[in-house]
Structures are given as structure tokens and as C-alpha cells.
Amino acid sequence: MQTNQVDVAVIGAGIVGLAHALTAAKQGLKVVVFERNSYAIGASVRNFGMIWPIGQPTGLLRERALKSREIWQETAQEAGFYLDTCGSLHLAYREDEMAVLEEFVATTGGDNIALLTPEEVAEKSQVVVTQGLLGALWSSTEMTVDPREAIAKIPILLKDKYQVQFCFNRVVTSISYPDIQAGEEIWKAERIFICSGSDFETLYPSLHQQSGMTKVKLQMMRTSPQNWRLGPSLCGGLTLTHYSAFAHCQSLAALKARIESETPHFCQWHIHVLMSQNELGELILGDSHEYGMTLDPFDRHFINQYVLDYLKGFANIPNLEIAETWHGIYAKIPGKTEFIANPEPGVTIVNGLGGAGMTLSFGLANDRV
Ligand SMILES: Cc1cc2nc3c(=O)[nH]c(=O)nc-3n(C[C@H](O)[C@H](O)[C@H](O)COP(=O)(O)OP(=O)(O)OC[C@H]3O[C@@H](n4cnc5c(N)ncnc54)[C@H](O)[C@@H]3O)c2cc1C
């Protein structure tokens, strides 16, 4: 039986694992990454590719998102993948949505955000529906990557520039510090990071179970390539009820109550609608949220229809032909922003980043490794 010794071992080649591997490798440490599949196919390649600091509350999480943003930019440059500093627009068509945006801007401040008039919105985006538009929140900090490209190219950068070893097609089945059982091999590591995403039944399952962690399924769509550029990523009033950045706004209660009474299906399926665009010109659309340890493997067409109908209320898309649909699953402890645990000295679980893993992982790893 072969034995290998490293400074840092990472389990999982999704964004959380890659962020920890990058941070450790930059410190000159000898790093190995184990990944169950021949390439990562989990939540990290199934998302919008949005780096979304505007969704994080001011303080530690916003700072972490902004640190991640910086690292994403450096990494995109080094690894040679697409990254667009496109910013975002939250569009308001109802008085209660506008009230939240106004309160948010008044209570948040900062020169990266501004309230725009419909005319100013039209200058930033050619597809926004301006009829009935009251205004929008512009934020300059949001960016998009194509997650399929980024999550494939970061390992190449890590191998070529930082001599990180990757063991793909290798499941880690048990850990007893400092030993790691990876397929037929035993590895030894000074520090072990478990970044296994929605697979939290394999390693230290009872610890995960005690944490209250659950799984969340999100339905997504991608259009055929468009021959025009979206500019800022777009969303509407539903998104104000989704991200904790807006939670402190007193005006949010009235908006939530109106959505609940007019359109309860959005609340039932936890739908809010976001749209980003990748380098190929494809639009990425979503999403819904279903919670549970065993999630229905079948996607619901009517959920995608709800998303498309809402989208049409704020964007005029000339060709909304859907090329691909899929769902992604992430791990989340309701009410918590991450799950960090030390099942034994030298071993750290980093999981449960929920819907913000692309936004927060680099900053989180930077704080912890
Ligand atoms: C549809 C959708 C849209 C989203 N949109 C956004 C967005 O736009 N912006 C944003 O910030 N966040 C977004 N998120 C959230 C973000 O994608 C996740 O928080 C993040 O990808 C989680 O990363 P991860 O590395 O923990 O998990 P994963 O990407 O699932 O990676 C875990 C990896 O570990 C491997 N693994 C597990 N167990 C083992 C084992 N025992 N041995 C070896 N390998 C193992 C798995 O094979 C997997 O590749 C979205 C999520 C979804 C599902």
C-alpha cells in the first residue's frame, strides 16, 4: 500500500475546495486535492457564475465578498478565464419595491451603489422593460464568470503554477488524522480540509447531522447564445426578499406581505429571478429552492415557467429559446452562512455556504487557511 505525505489535503474540487487549495498553495505549502469525479460536477458548475457582494449584509460578510471579488479577478487573470465586471440592477416596478431600494440606499451608503431613474437604467441595459419602471438599484461590485470554465481552469492553474496535486476519480472514504483513505491509498496530511458540498453523509456524517444541515435543490435554465450583450446582471423585486443584505429594511415587510397575497407560488417554491450572461452570449436564468435531505430527482416544468413569466415582466429578450435545463443542489444550515467544524485536531469541515459559495469562498479560505 502506497503512502504519501503533504502539508494540506483538500477533499472536493468545487469552489470551496479550490479556494482552500489556492490559499494554501500560495503560502508555499504542498497541497493535494481529492475529487470523486473526473471533474467537479456539483453546485460549483451549476450556478449563475455570479459574484454577488450586494446580497451580503454590510460588515464581515460584505468584506469577505469583496475580498473574494479581488481574488477572483487575480485568479481569472492568472488562469485565463472569462470574468465580466458587469455590475447589477435591482429593478422596481411597484411602490413597495422602490421603498425598499430607497431605504437600502439610505441605510447602506457607499459609492458603489446608486438609485437610478428609468432613463438612467435604459442607458445601462438595452433589454430592461422601461414601461412601468419606477427606478433601480445600481451596484458596481457584481461580476460574472462562466462556472464551467472557471472550475475547470483553476485546477490547471493550481497544477501548473503551484504544483498542487489533483487526484480526480478518487473518493475519500474515511479520515483518521493524519491518515486519509483515498481509494486504495493512504495519504498523510498536516492539515485536512473537507469541502464536500452536498455529500455530507460520507465523512463525519453524525457531526453534519447534528448541525441541522440540509440540502437545497434549485432549478435553472440556459438560453441559446444571444447576439447582444446583457450588461449588468438583472433581477426584480422578488430578489429583495431573498438576500439578507435587505433584511434590515423596515419597508421589506409590506413587500413580502404583498408578494405572499398576490403571488403565493413564488413563496411556496422560494422563487426569485436572476439573469446573468456568459462569454458565449448565453443567458443563465433561475431559480427556485426546495429543501430536504432527499430531493425529488425530477424537475418541474411549471417552476421554470413561473421564472420565465416573471422574467418577461422586467426584460425584453428577443430570443428566449431555452437550450438547457438542470438543477443544482447545495448544502445549507437554515439561518447560518457557513458550517465550520473541527471533528478532530488538524481536520476542518468547511461547508454550508448555501447560495453564496461563488461569492464568499475565496474570502473565507483567505481568513481560515
Ligand atoms: C443552481 C445554483 C445556483 C447558484 N448560484 C450562485 C451564484 O450565482 N453565486 C454564488 O455565489 N453562489 C451560487 N450558488 C451557490 C454555490 O454554487 C455553492 O455555494 C458552491 O458551489 C458550493 O461549493 P462546494 O465546493 O461546497 O460544493 P460542490 O461544488 O458541490 O463541490 C463539492 C465537491 O466535493 C466532491 N466530494 C464530495 N465528497 C467527496 C469525497 N468523499 N471524496 C472526494 N470528493 C468528494 C464532490 O464530488 C464535489 O465535486 C448557486 C448554487 C446552485 C446550486
Image: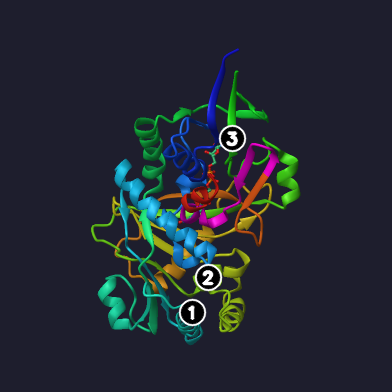
Evaluate whether residue 114 shows in this view.
yes
Residue that numbered label 3 is attached to: 191
Label whose residue precedes the other's in the sequence (3 or 1)? 1
**Residue at 56% over, 84% down:** 251
Q: Position of residue 350 (x, y in %)?
A: 60, 46
Determine the image quadrant of residue 199: top right
Residue type for callout 1 = Phe
| Pointer 1 residue Cβ closer than 8 Å to ligand 1 | no
In the rendered view, would you say 119 is above or below 367? Answer: below
Say what amino acid the circle numbered 2 marks.
Answer: Ala
* Circles 3, 2 touching at the beta carbon (< 8 Å): no
Left or right of residue 334: residue 330: left
Q: CA distance from mark 1 to mark 2?
A: 9 Å
Kind of residue sitting beneath label 3? Arg
The residues bearing labels 3 and 1 have C-alpha atoms spaced at a distance of 42 Å
Left or right, residue 346 beside residue 86: right
Gap between marks 3 and 2, in whole Å?
34 Å
Name the residue carrying label 1. Answer: 104
- Expressed as whole percent of the image width and height from the top left, the position of residue 153 reads 36, 39
Cβ of mark 2 under 8 Å from ligand 1: the answer is: no
Instruction: Estimate how packed mark 2 is, as few (under 14), some (14 to 19) or many (20 or more) residues with alpha carbons within 10 Å.
Output: some
Residue 212, image x, y percentages: 72, 53
- Which residues fall within the magenta stretch? 342-360
Q: Which residue is under mark 2?
A: 245
Asked if residue 322 shows in the view, the reply is no
Residue at the extreme front of the image, as rendered: 28
